Each structure stands twice: as structure tokens, then as C-alpha cells.
Amino acid sequence: MGGSQAFGNGTDTTDVYKLEEVIEEVAQLEKVADISNQNLKIAKSENTTKKYEVVYYGTSVTDIRRLGYLVDNYTEEIEDYSYLFDVEEDGTLRIKNYLSYYDAKNERVTLTDENGEIITNLVIPSKINGKQVLKIPPACFSNIVNLETIKLPKGLKEIEHQAFINFKCNVTIDVPDSVDKIERYAFYMSDVSGDYLMKIKVPFNSADAKPSGWEDEWADDYGVENHTIEIIYSNN
């Protein structure tokens, strides 16, 4: 259990925070019958170099074990985004009420939260309303003007043709290693995007190492004089 040990009395459970991605990953790594997502949480770390770590809370008050998985700076739950997204039965992600975010005159999409505040950093959870996010369909993210970063969820399997197209802002998109299929032009920037830059962080260290299910030209800036797509490899 990675040097796990119970820690003493006086633990303040009000300092405990959930973090879906870390918790699910640790649950899989531990592979212990009594450990489930419901028993794992994030708590303030006793390690001076990290802020938080994964903790197991058992069925009894005394059954509390630090698992040794340290986390840098997560302090709150990943937002559910159920107000923004729907997930279909096959795991396809959809933006709810898409037209409410769309400025047809200027062909711009501005995503906002429940309070009407503009979203700049989007972390898509692996599950929304209890449904696993497995696929991102064509034009799911099109003509977006407000996102600076997008972190795609662990467990995502497929990104379809032109799922991310013609962003009108500089954006960095983080693709997890669970993605085993990406269609041609899944990430696409054309001349209508202007000089904005789409950076894509991938989980391999060179173009030759891409998974076999990622089609050639999975990312492309066709017809653009200055390249507007940059691939960031995992060794960079």
C-alpha cells in the first residue's frame, strides 16, 4: 500500500476534498477488495513538499490509512458540468442548449457557467450524471472563443472527425492515454481561425509513437499560411 499507515487522532475531515480522476486511478491501482471510490478522498498532506494526498476512510473511525499517493494542489471537487453537458447512452458527449452559447452573426461560441460567468479552464470529468464520457463527436467544440485550457477525461476512448474545429482563441488541449481512436481532422484549424494557436498535449514522445488507431492527419491546419496547431509530446 505504498508505505501506508494510519494517522493519529484529531484528523480534521472538513479538510477532505474529493478529486474524481485521482481517486478512480488510485482505486484501480490498489486493487484491494475493501477499497472503492466511496472510501477514497483527498486530504491535507503531512508531507511538507506536497499539499494533498489520497486517504482511505474505512467503515470504522479508526480505519484511516494514508496511501502514499501525493497530489500537488487540488483543493476542491472537479466540477460536474451537468448544466453544460449531456452524455448519451453510448458515452457521447454533447453540449446542452448549444444555441444559447452561439452568436450566429459572428459565428462565435462562448461557454459560460451556471452564473453566466465565462469559463476559461475546462476540466471535463470522466463521468457526468453517472455516465462515462467515452466519445467526443464532430463539432462538439466549434468556434469557441473563451477556453484557454481543456483537460479531456481519463477513460475517454474516441475523438471523431472535426470534434475540435476552428477555435477563435489560443487553447491548450490535454489528451489522456486512454484515447485509442482519433479520426482524421479531429483537431482542425482553417483560415477562419485567424492566427490563434491550438496546442495539443499528447501522451507519447514522438510522431512515430502515436497509437495505431489515431489516423494520419488527426490534427491539421489545412490552408493556413502560418501553422496554428502545435503538438506537445510527453517528453517536452
Image (cartoon, grey):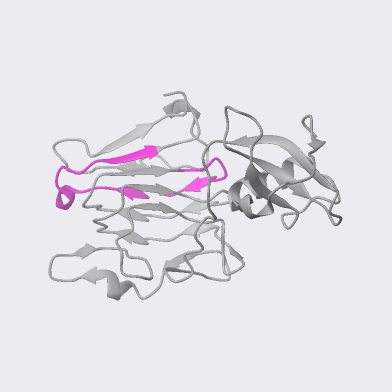
Tell whether 106 sits left or right of 30: left
Measured as percent of width and height from the top left, residue 81 is found at 47, 65
Q: Name the quarter where the C terminus is drawn.
A: top left
Q: Which residues are magenta?
A: 175-200
Residue 77 quadrant:
bottom right
Eyeballing the image, is 120 above or below 110?
above
Image point (73%, 40%), residue name: 29
Q: Can I make out residue 56 in this image?
A: yes
Residue drawn at x 25%, y 47% as measured from the top left: 189
Q: Quadrant of the N terminus?
A: top right
Left or right: residue 25 versus residue 227 is: right
Q: Quadrant of residue 115?
A: bottom left
Q: Would residue 198 be counted in the magenta stretch?
A: yes
Q: Nearer the viewer, residue 211 or 31?
A: 31
Does residue 94 sit above or below 168 in this rendering?
below
Residue 38 sits inside the magenta stretch: no
In the displayed structure, 91 sits above or below 64; it is below
Which percent across, then down, holds residue 173? 38, 44
